[in-house]
Image (cartoon, helix red, strand yellow):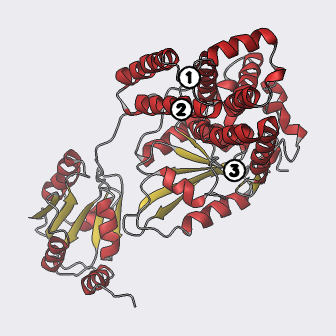
């Protein structure tokens, strides 16, 4: 039988109580409620009209200059009555003012960085918008580097991220719906979409999944993604996480849904397809021939990153007769001093590469780059000299690692790195047959995935030839007059001339 904590039950009951008209009762309650919060400020004073009031706020979440100049000064020296705040002819230099009647709403407002004003003989409080918490300045994206596109990336403040998107999507049909996730530590979430373009079923599905989250707190967008995606057990991402506002704006205009979350410098886009993870926003800023070449290069890198070590293992272990004689002599000479079978040799080198990659990410940038370059050269050369691995294996693993870096999306690149290991093992057991079966299982899994109900393999499986103009190739922009068929938009034409 589950036991209930009496103190927690009592606190919850008190939270639902209305605000008292006695200012001393309100001050006592707020002091007891946050008795262990040294950043709580309670300022009691009389207004110019000799009304007893108390201003309550958290010093770490509020702009002190705004409180002193825009709130305290007018109340003490200019306003004859608190009721004058709501008169249009007497403007108060504060963004917004709202009346709050319950302690639940008051506490939420305080944690949002608002200042709360209690008034004697008044059974409600006033919340003033005086937020001023520490925040990071807008900077260039760290993961999604931009060559010809925008160089502004998202930050950890939700309102700033929304402003960055509005700078690109200046459409009155852009809808922003606010939600909250987390019971103990609620976090604000925005759902964005263009109302006359997006399929309303996607908006409803995203809304339902967010509302069904039952957890104390959701601290990062990655946690939110895992809770709302179609298949959390797969290694492949079904939603796109991006830190570039121009990328999010482009997907909104295509008919997708975006999700912003406070405290996170990224945004989620859904629904997504496999082909979309090989596209970059810079593709649309480059010449179409260059963009097409880069996309074909990414697709090639995708296959190389998965099958190159496995193919080497299968050929060396089972099918060495397909190797030309001159190359066979070179491979044999290279492997003559290696005591391990190819699969163990490959796994050792792959693990070494992954360790160097993680070390480079966790260390500061100058040191991380040095560790990645110097470590790779030293480890590879030392392993060859010691006879642990062959020269050919070092080349194979190096090319595989480079191919993984070409994938523009970090989540997809990480998934490919993990898939590589089981494919290597099955190739070591069954040769080319095992590699073929492994690839068939992999692609069957990719085709079976869905993103908000949209087939992950679209427009390749199922086939939608109309969308192939922006998959393997990027045709001239004048030819792309329709939005992707796979997202089933209300308006298929990009010109927005009609609603189809």
Q: Circle 1 sits in a helix, a strand or a loop, which is it?
A: loop
Name the disc covering residue 303, or none.
Answer: none
When asked about the image quadrant of residue 292, the answer is top right
- Compared with 154, 304 (above or below) is above
- Compared with 178, 439 (above or below) is above
Residue under pointer 2: 348
Are discs 1 and 2 less than 8 Å apart at CB?
Answer: yes
Are discs 3 and 2 less than 8 Å apart at CB?
Answer: no
Rate crowding at label 2 as few (under 14), some (14 to 19) or many (20 or more) other CA atoms within 10 Å.
Answer: few
Of marks 3 and 2, the one in the foreground: 2
> Most extreme residue toward the bottom, as rendered?
1
Are discs 1 and 3 less than 8 Å apart at CB?
Answer: no
Q: Earlier in the sequence, mark 1 or mark 2?
A: 2
Residue under pointer 1: 389
**How far is mark 1 from mark 2, CA to CA?**
9 Å
Q: Circle 2 sits in a helix, a strand or a loop, which is it?
A: helix
Q: Circle 3 sits in a helix, a strand or a loop, which is it?
A: loop
Residue under pointer 3: 271
Rate crowding at label 1 as few (under 14), some (14 to 19) or many (20 or more) other CA atoms within 10 Å.
Answer: many
81 relative position to 96: left or right: left
Name the spot of residue 168 as percent of width and height, x first: 58, 36
Name the spot of residue 235 as percent of width and height, x first: 62, 49
Q: Quadrant of the N terminus?
A: bottom left
Residue in the foreground of this view, choosing between 293 and 336 = 336
Rate crowding at label 3 as few (under 14), some (14 to 19) or many (20 or more) other CA atoms within 10 Å.
Answer: many
When asked about the image quadrant of residue 216, the answer is bottom left
439 relative position to 193: left or right: right
322 relative position to 384: left or right: right
Q: Earlier in the sequence, mark 1 or mark 3?
A: 3
Quick check: can you spot residue 144?
no
Name the spot of residue 450 as percent of width and height, x first: 73, 54
């Amino acid at each position: 039988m589950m036991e209930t904590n009496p103190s927690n039950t009592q606190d919850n009951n008190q939270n639902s109580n209305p605000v008292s008209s006695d200012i001393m009762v309100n001050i006592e309650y707020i002091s007891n409620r946050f008795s262990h919060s040294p950043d709580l400020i309670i300022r009691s004073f009389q207004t110019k009209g000799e009304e007893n009031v108390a201003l309550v706020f958290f010093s770490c979440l509020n702009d002190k200059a705004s409180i002193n100049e825009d709130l305290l000064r007018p109340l003490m020296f200019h306003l004859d009555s608190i009721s004058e705040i709501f008169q249009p002819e007497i403007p108060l230099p504060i963004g917004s003012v709202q009346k709050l009647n319950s302690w639940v709403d008051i506490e939420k407002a305080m944690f949002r960085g608002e200042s709360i004003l209690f008034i004697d003989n008044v059974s409600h409080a006033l919340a003033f918008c005086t937020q001023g918490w520490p925040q990071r300045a807008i900077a260039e994206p760290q993961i999604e580097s931009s060559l010809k596109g925008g160089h502004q990336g998202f930050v950890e403040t939700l309102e700033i991220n929304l402003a960055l998107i509005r700078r690109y999507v200046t459409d009155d049909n852009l809808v922003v719906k606010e939600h909250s996730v987390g019971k103990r530590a609620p976090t604000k979430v925005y759902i964005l979409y263009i109302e006359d373009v997006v399929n309303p079923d996607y908006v409803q599905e995203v809304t339902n999944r967010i509302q069904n989250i039952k957890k104390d707190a959701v601290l990062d967008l990655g946690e939110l993604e895992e809770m709302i995606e179609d298949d959390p057990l797969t290694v492949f991402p079904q939603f796109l996480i991006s830190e570039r506002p121009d990328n999010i704006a482009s997907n909104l205009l295509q008919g997708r849904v975006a999700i912003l979350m406070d405290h996170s410098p990224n945004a989620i886009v859904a629904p997504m397809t496999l082909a979309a993870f090989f596209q970059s926003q810079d593709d649309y800023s480059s010449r179409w021939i260059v963009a097409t070449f880069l996309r074909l290069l990414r697709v090639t890198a995708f296959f190389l990153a998965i099958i190159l070590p496995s193919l080497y293992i299968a050929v060396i272990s089972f099918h060495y007769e397909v190797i030309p004689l001159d190359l066979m002599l070179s491979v044999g000479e290279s492997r003559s001093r290696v005591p391990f079978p190819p699969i163990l040799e490959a796994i050792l080198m792959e693990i070494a590469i992954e360790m160097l990659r993680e070390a480079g990410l966790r260390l500061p940038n100058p040191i991380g780059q040095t560790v990645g370059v110097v470590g790779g050269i030293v480890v590879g050369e030392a392993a060859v000299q010691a006879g642990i691995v062959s020269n050919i294996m070092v080349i194979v693993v190096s090319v595989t690692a480079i191919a993984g870096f070409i994938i523009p999306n970090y989540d997809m690149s990480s998934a490919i790195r993990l898939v590589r290991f089981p494919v290597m093992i099955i190739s070591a057991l069954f040769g080319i047959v095992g590699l073929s079966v492994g690839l068939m299982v992999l692609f069957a899994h990719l085709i079976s995935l869905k993103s908000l109900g949209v087939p992950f393999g679209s427009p390749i499986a199922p086939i939608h030839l109309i969308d192939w103009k922006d998959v393997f190739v990027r045709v001239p922009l004048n030819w792309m007059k329709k939005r992707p068929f796979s997202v089933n938009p209300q308006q298929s034409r990009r010109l927005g001339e009609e609603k189809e």
